[in-house]
Amino acid sequence: MSSHDVLGRTEGGDLRLAGLTKRYGSFTAVDDLSLTIPQGSFFALLGASGCGKTTTLRMVSGLEDPTVGQIFLGEQEVTDLKPYRRPVNTVFQNYALFPHLDIFENVAFGLRRRGVKDVKKAVTDMLDLVELGHLAKRKPTQLSGGQQQRIALARALINQPQVLLLDEPLGALDLKLRRQMQIELKRIQTEVGLTFVHVTHDQEEAMTMADTIAVMNHGRIEQLGSPADLYENPTTTFVANFLGQSNLIPASVEGEKDGIVSVSAHGQQLKVDAKRCRSTSGKIILGVRPEKVQVATDRGEVPDGYNALVGGKVVDTSFIGVSTQYLVQMPSGEELSVFEQNTGRAIQRPGAEVVVYWDPSQGFGLEGSQDIEAGAEADEEAAA
Amino acid sequence: MATQTIAAPASAGAPKERRKSPLAWAKQHVLLVVTFLVFVFMLLPNAVILWMSFNSPAGKFNYTWNKFSLDAWKNPCSNSTMCHSIGLSLEIGVVATIIATILGTMIAFAMVRHRFKARSGINALLFLPMAAPEVVMGATLAALFFNTIGPGGMGFWTITIAHVMFCISYVVVTVKSRLAGMDPTLERAAQDLYATPTQTFMKVTLPLVAPGIGAAALLAFAISIDDYIITVFTAGNSETFPMYIFGSVQRAYPAQIDVIGSLMLLGTMAVIAVSQVLNQMRAARKK
């Protein structure tokens, strides 16, 4: 599906952004962004509102001109190409279906503009792909949100673009429908094999669908990698807080031996894998995900070699069913989150004195000079 | 009727058994009664015109009922001056509407889509013809035409220019509101789907704004066809239909005026009825 000659284009290729910058007056929306998105991949740009992800998308589609930088599709530079000359199509956030045209004509729009005479079969096939063939004669306003979303997708896909851009495509749908569409989108992407670039503020959406995620913050890419990579190995406090939750503890490095870094935090000795540390000297921030931490009432319960912090006190217990979430206050006043799976262990009530412990190989170390709260607010905003 | 459903809850709360006096019934249907009275108030003059068009007036003035006759309907143009004035009014109306709609639509696009220096100034200027007293506008225009082309040249074109001037304001306001309510992403979507700027305009923008342009044109035509004050000042020796009626009140008022009035009324109602029926047929076909 990668070679199309309707627009006289060559064999598809990777989407490459080189030093892409967009300024509005003194505000820099996208800051020197360089990125290669391999052909056929499902790529997500994830970030809070105002991080520059939508601006990046619009520069790729041609609806916005970059201040500096270049955009390549395979070998071809498209930076100065008008939007209607680019082999790129967009699924807009509000769908932007043409209200005066019926569903058939909406889907046929791109083909007709390119002078394709016989569109009937292509449109029918495309409507079948999104399972809405029976609605061809309806007007967009007569469709539900989920149906409109699929039509918007069909209208873009029918042109077999080299890159399909999705701008918060599921933002307007309710939770249940969003889950269903996530699976659907992933199915369609696998089926047609096109490059999908997906912009979202919803981390779960990005993690479910994308092969590769770029977390954006202030017009720059904070970290790029597979969903598992980003989650297990965040490189900044922003990523650690924005993608899921993290317990971040300020610590200072005491020494390194056999690939294990010893640190001290709250006057207690802890260990962390050197390979999972961005910095192995001076002040660092030790991080661990809440679900990797467990609580015990006695120091003796902690397995050998595990990191343990003593002197904690449970201040909040929420029993969810599949898990129990604790908020444990350390003597220093810092609060740690613990998500403990329901394995039948006794539930600790608020006020209980506990030891928190985790496997040192599951922790990670970050540069100590960063804002420890970075990304936490952005995450809340995105979740709202 | 909507009025009945609104009034219904009031009657539902009243005791059912007791026989109601007409006054009690009216109390419970205040909205219905008021609506009915308003309709009577608005439609009565039209009914009188229709009724009087079948009169055979005793003298020069068709003001009092004499006896039933179809003469006026059979010979609506027995008075050639009147029919000539109708022709002139229609010509001016059509020409002024076309020019004002084209110019006004372009101004509306410029005002909504672009931010330029003179924008607020132009906004104020456009509002002026709607706000300024017509007498003042008419008198100034008379002075202008008098001093430029002279009284001999005044007629069809001077009236048309004056009508275009005030019609533009209404066109701009109507088209602007339609344009402002249009989602700008639709045009971006069209471009994204390989439509050139011209194609985007013809296939997306224009069809979406067309209802607004159509409404603006109808409004312009309606305002032009019945304008009297400004027309009098700019007409020279020409006479439009409103001017003819105004004059006939002093000379002679034939039943034909009521015939024309009735025709205009019935014509308008027919257009509305046909469009309603078409809409319903279209809606029914969709289902």
Image (spheres, helix red, strand yellow):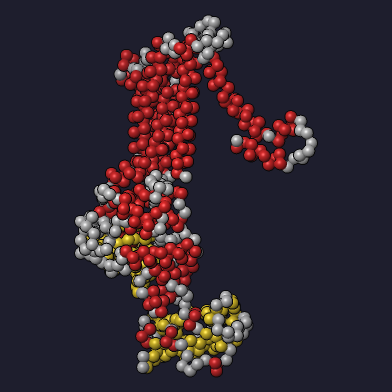
Q: Position of residue A287 (x, y in %)?
A: 44, 81
Eyeballing the image, is A22 above or below B57?
A: below
User: Left of B204 or right of it: where is A291?
Assistant: right
Question: Which picture quadrant has residue A34?
Answer: bottom left
Point 39% across, 74% down: residue: A227
Q: Position of residue A166 (x, y in %)?
A: 37, 61
User: Left of A16 or right of it: where is A365?
Assistant: right
A253 or A321, which is in the foreground? A321
User: Left of A275 or right of it: where is A76?
Assistant: left
Where is the N terminus of chain B found, in terms of image quarters?
Answer: top right
Eyeballing the image, is B117 above or below A262?
A: above
Eyeballing the image, is B79 above or below A61?
A: above
User: Left of A306 or right of it: where is B40?
Assistant: right
Q: Position of residue B257 (x, y in %)?
A: 48, 15
Question: Which picture quadrant has residue A320?
Answer: bottom right
Point 52% across, 79% down: residue: A339
